[in-house]
Image (cartoon, rainbow, N blue to C red):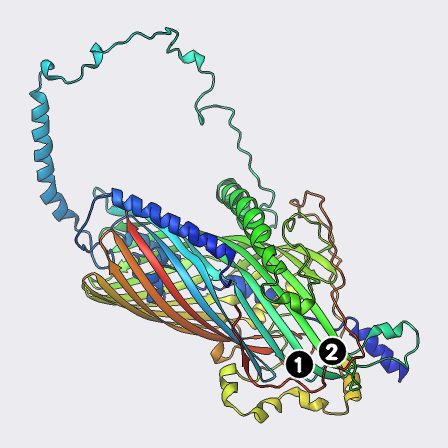
Amino acid sequence: MKKIFFLIGFLCSIAINAQSLGYNDLGVLFSEDESNGTARYRGMSGAFGALGGDLSSMDINPAGAAVFLKSEFSFSLNFRNQNISSDYYNTLNSVEEDFTNLSQAGAVFVFKNSNSRWNNTAISFNYSISRDFDNNWVANGNSDFPTFIYDDDYTDDGDSTNDILYLNSDDQNFRNFTNGTNDKFTFSVASQYDDNLYIGAAITFQDISFYQAVTLQENNNDGNGNSIQGNLFEELFVVGNGISFNLGVISKASDNLRLGLSYKSPTWYEMNEEFRDENGVNGLDYSLRAPSKLTGSIAYVFNKNGLISLDYSTRNYNNINIFSSVDFSDVNQGFSTDLKNASELRFGAEIRSKEFSFRGGYHYQKSPYKNALSSDHLKGYSLGLGYNFGNIKFDLSYEDANRTDVYDFYPQYPEINPTELNFDTSKITASLVFNI
Amino acid sequence: MKVFYLSKIKQLNFSALIIILIGFTSCGTYQGAYSDDDGIYTTRDRNISSDTNSNQDDNYFAQKLEEYQNIDNGDLITDVDGYSYQDQNGVYESNDSNYENSPWGYSNDVTININSNRGFGSFGNPFWNNGFNNWGFNNWGFNNWGYNSWGFNGWGFNGWGFNGWGYGNRWNNGFYGFNNFNNGRFFGQPFGNNHYYRNYDSYGKRTAYNSRNNTTKRRVSSIANRRNSTISSKTNSTKRSTYNNSTRTRSVNKNTQRTPTRRVQNTNRTNTNRSRTDSGSSTRRSTPTRTRSSSTTTRRSSTPRSSSSKSRRVN
């Protein structure tokens, strides 16, 4: 009996663990694109690969810069309502928060050259938030599986008979707080060749700041009125910057039919992380390669009355890779075994009536995890409205998206289920476009 | 309260930019009527515009030229050659040799310091060594302008935005209720200002787990589906039921399966790559993390928390 108690005590002193995100999760998090942008772009769920003519469309296909007829500036403000509900052993929790961001700002300058067959050249700069990490969720419940069960103060006296074991689980509370953004700066140049061909190239700089704080609290009792509480807190701070390039082409197959094709190279990031727990501060520098992306697009324009547009993108998340002076082969193995090629579908439509434009769209993005449930794939729709004042245009969009996820805050214990998460995101984007 | 301070600053900048741009736009030509300048719907027709407008332009300039040619000397409004004045001081000399300081940009001794400490070529990725150090990242893009000097370290992130001003406050105020949770033990510590310059206690890969790597864990179903299903079908399908013995034996079984993996790996403690930590400011070592409130009081009932759904809105 004594022996067993001592064994328990020894193991429990290092047992309790809340977990910040692992490297595989971070690799996916920093690779995925949430696609913020102008309100016109968002109102059509981002289906702009074959259309161009919008500052955010250069994030997909840089050839779209040459579609502009005039130079312009645009700015977008984004209001996000985020509802994250968790389910941990049938205890439901939900946290709702609002966030406001300057989600897009950019300019395009158009140079007309009627003497050359390259008759319309445009350079553009666009800033947008590739991903907003601001989120907060809580989970609590009772797994009925205590892990912090032994108060090892009682071992100091060398007498095990008065030791207390806390074998009854009261509850576990977990909080996850994340903050930061993945910012994207895209410089692109594009030109129109004759009337029906647009070719463009872009270079994109990305800037990551990510912060995560997790707390785990576990309450157990011994059945005789004694209770024990274990607390654990971890912080993770990751900063990094990355670069990628982008090539694209748009063709006017006929007066009304547009075809687009674009390739986005892998993004090479340099990351630095600081991790803080009871052992102090741990630092690490590493390089992260996010996978490339291929997008094919088709759009049909109904003369001046409206259009429909479709984008299909594919990205192989197996190709995420981490290089460091430290051995990351297990992590890289995880990327190739747990992830897959994930596709994305965007559909958008616009109807125009004089100064007014009415828009709608649908968006479907597959989860890169092989063991993803069907609910883990992001599904969202969008609505939009635009008004053209002449030199100023005002656009408004609303979108709603939903996906589920899973988070395991007892990763070492196969006996304990992870918590199920449901992300419900509503966004309103307002944009002003200024002709110059 | 909900909106972040950082966001408020962004909103301020945003409104200022809008005002500036409205100013820019109003300086341009006024276009009262709606015109279709959308490149998606409208194609530029180069031939028509050059044919119709160029004739007018030619006529206009020809006419003006004719007017100017008809002006004779007596009609000149301002004769520059006829202007002169006596300088009272008389010391002004237009001698270029007095100007020892060349205009900015013409001098030979302008030195541009390139900060490439956190270089992109240091990790053996061939991409960085071929050209991006010279142009893209270090000289121009990231270090001097974007990342280190202006954006992140000097102004945006550490000095002003994130740590010094935005972040620390929120934690210390218990904005998200973490203080109550932890008795202020962790969050109360100043987290921000010297974040970038403190020395690490260790360097290397942290022990980290991923949400989905543990193949022994099966997700029961999605939340949406689970809400519709009955409770009994959910709970009994998990592994917990195999541990339905007496409490004490259950723990023993559990512990034999447990692998004590929880150690931060200190093996790679070489601080070679971190050239940025130049200040020897406080090497903070956090206190042991586990706060244990062991008491003999019966403040906690042993019944599990009710499993009814609970939603609240965090303000």
> Which amino acid type is shown beneath numbered disc 2?
Thr
Q: Is residue A44 left or right of residue B110?
A: left
For the residues bearing labels 1 and 2, Cβ distance under 8 angstroms? yes
Q: Chain of mark 1?
A: A
Residue A337 or B310: which is nearer the viewer?
Answer: B310
> Which amino acid type is shown beneath numbered disc 1?
Ile
Q: Position of residue B276 (x, y in %)?
A: 64, 45
Crowding near the residue tagged with mark 1, few <14, some 14–19, many ≥20 C-alpha atoms within 10 Å: many
Q: Mark 2 = which residue?
A: A147
Q: Is residue A149 left or right of residue A330?
A: right
Is residue B84 visible to the viewer in this orientation of the structure? yes
| Residue B71 in which image quadrant | top left
Crowding near the residue tagged with mark 2, few <14, some 14–19, many ≥20 C-alpha atoms within 10 Å: many
Q: Position of residue A40 (x, y in %)?
A: 32, 62
Look at the image and tell me in which quarter the N terminus of chain A lies.
Answer: bottom right
Q: Residue at x 9, y 16 (%)?
A: B72
Q: Which mark is residue B27?
A: none
Q: Which mark is residue A416?
A: 1
Q: Position of residue A233 (x, y in %)?
A: 68, 66
Same chain assignment for discs 1 and 2? yes
Q: Residue at x 20, y 46 (%)?
A: B30
Is residue A287 visible to the viewer in this orientation of the structure? no
Residue B167 or A388: which is nearer the viewer?
Answer: B167
Mark 2, secondary structure of its residue? loop
